[in-house]
Image: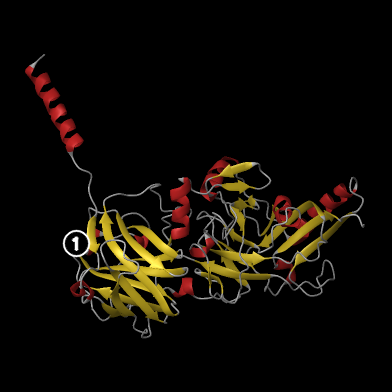
Amino acid sequence: MTIQRILTVLMTLTLALSAYGAEAPSDALLFDFETPAELANWAPVKLADVKSEQPAPRIELSADGATSGKSCLKITFAGGQWSAIGTTVIPVKGTWKEFQTLKADITVDHDVVAYVGIGQGPQDPAALKPQWQKDVMLIPGRNEVALTIRHGLGRTVIDPKQGEITSFIIGMFQPAVGDVLRVDNIRLSAEWPAPQVTGWFSPYNHDGYSSWAAADFHRTKVIPRFDVLGADMKVASYEELSKKLKPSWKPAAPLTVDQVEAEFKAVFEELKKTNPDAVMTVLRETRNDPDTGKNQTGWKFTYLNCHGPDGPNAGREGVAKKYETVEAFMRHRGVLLQPDFSPIPKGAKILAARFVLTRVVDKDSKPIDKPNLYVAEPCNRDWDPDFANCYYYAKGKHWKAVNGIYYGEDPDFYPSLLFHGPGSSPVNSWDFTAGLKFWIEQGHENHGFFIYGDAGDYMRIYTPKAKDIRQRPAIWVVYSAAPAK
C-alpha cells in the first residue's frame, strides 16, 4: 500500500470516528419562566399592524401548567382583537441561523388561536413589529407545539439577513375576557421535524400551525390522502392529481350555458330509455328560474382566505362581502358554496349530474392554454356565511386548522374530491354524479364544498348573487325517484 493510500485511509477513519462520536445538536432553552426576574422582562405590547389599542393581558408565574421546572408563564386576557405581550430580552443571542424549529408547551382550557411573533433588528418596545409570525390553532389541554422557522413562505421563515433576534411576542386572536394561555419551556431545536414539508396538508402548514393536524401526524405518521370520487383513485394532494392528469390535458371547448344545457338534455333522453321514471332538474339559487320556473332560495356561499402573512391581516380575519363575482384560486383562497338539495326527493337515486360554473371573461381575456385543474372538497361543518373566515366557521366555533384544512377524526373537510377537471372554458361543466351521491345516497349531511385550483390559472367566477340568473352556479341532475310505499 502506498503512503498516499495509507494517508487517505487514515483520514477517512478519522472523519468517520469523529462523526460517530459527535453529539447531535441539542435544544437551546429560550424561556423557562422560573423566577420573578424573568417575568419582569415581559409586558403588554401593541402589535404594529393593529390599529387600535388592545386591552392589556395580566401576566404572572403559575405552577398550574408548568412542564419544565416549578412554574410557567400564565397570561390572562381581557378581550381584544390581537392582544399580546412581549419582551426584548432574548437569552439566545444571534440570528438563530443554526436552528430549524421553535418549540413550546402551551396549555389552554378550550380551543383558541394563539400567536407567536419574532422581531429582528431595532425594535420599538411600545409597538413591536415581528419579521416572523405564526398563528397556532390549539387543542384543549397541553399542546407540545413545534413551529418551523427555517422552512416555509414569506414571514414563516426567519431570514438571518434581517439581523439579530431582538423581540419575542406571545398573544391570542380575539380572546374572550378571562381566556388563559399557560406557556412553558420555550426552546430552539436544530431538528427539522418529519415529514419535512410545510404545504397545506402538512402538520407544519405554512399558513398556520394546527395542534390537531400535528397530533394526527404524530399518531399515524401519514399526511392525509384524498379519494378522487368517480375515478377509483387516491392521491396525496391536489398537486399529485394535477401531475397525473397533466399529460392528457387539453383546453376545454369554449362552451356556453345553452350548449351545456343541450348536452345534458341529451344525456337525460338517453337515460330515460332504461329509466322511464327519470327526472331532470336544475338546482340554482333563483326565483322564477328560467329553466324550471321554480323558486330556490336555499343556497349560501362565502369566500375563505388564509393567505399569509399570519397574525393581524384583514384578508384572513374578516368576513368576506357577498359579491356578484369572487375568485376560485388555490386551497388557501377560494369559495365555500352550499347548494340547496331540497328539490331532490329523499331516497332518490342519482343517475347523472353536472356542476356548472361560469367564469368571468372580458374583452382582454386570453384563451387558457396552460394545464389547469379544479377540484372541490366536501365540508363537515355547519358554517355561517355571516361569521366564517380563516379561523371560525361560525360564531365562537373554530376550524381545527386554518381554512378548515384538517382531515382527521371529525374533520373540517372530508379528504375527498367531489369532482375534478379543467376550468378553461367560459362555462365549465364537471361530472358531479359521484359528488352528488356523496350526500344524496351516502347520507352525508350537506354543508357544501370548497372549490379551488392551482397557480396555473386564476379563475374569477360568478356567485349565487350574479345578476344574470343563468351565470350563477348550478347543478344539472337526473335522478330516479324512490318508488312510493
How far from the left and from the top, in percent, is residue 262?
81, 56
Q: Which image quarter is the N terminus in?
A: top left
Q: Tell whether 243 sits left or right of 59.
A: right
Q: Tell whether 259 sits left or right of 189.
A: right
Corner quadrant of residue 440: bottom right
Q: Which residue is drawn at 63% across and 70% down?
A: 301
Corner quadrant of residue 117: bottom left
Q: Residue at x 26, y 51 (%)?
A: 190
Q: Can residue 308 be seen in this view?
A: no
Q: Which image quarter is the C terminus in?
A: bottom right
**Residue with the most extreme left position:** 3
Examine the rendered structure and indicate whether residue 348 appears above or below residue 127: above
How far from the left and from the top, in percent, is residue 314?
45, 75
Q: Tell me the residue that label 1 is attached to.
A: 92
How far from the left and from the top, in percent, is residue 122?
20, 73
Q: Can residue 135 be seen in this view?
A: yes
Within 10 angstroms of label 1, few (less than 14), some, or many (20 or more) residues? some
As shown in the figure, which amino acid type bears the numbered disc 1?
Val
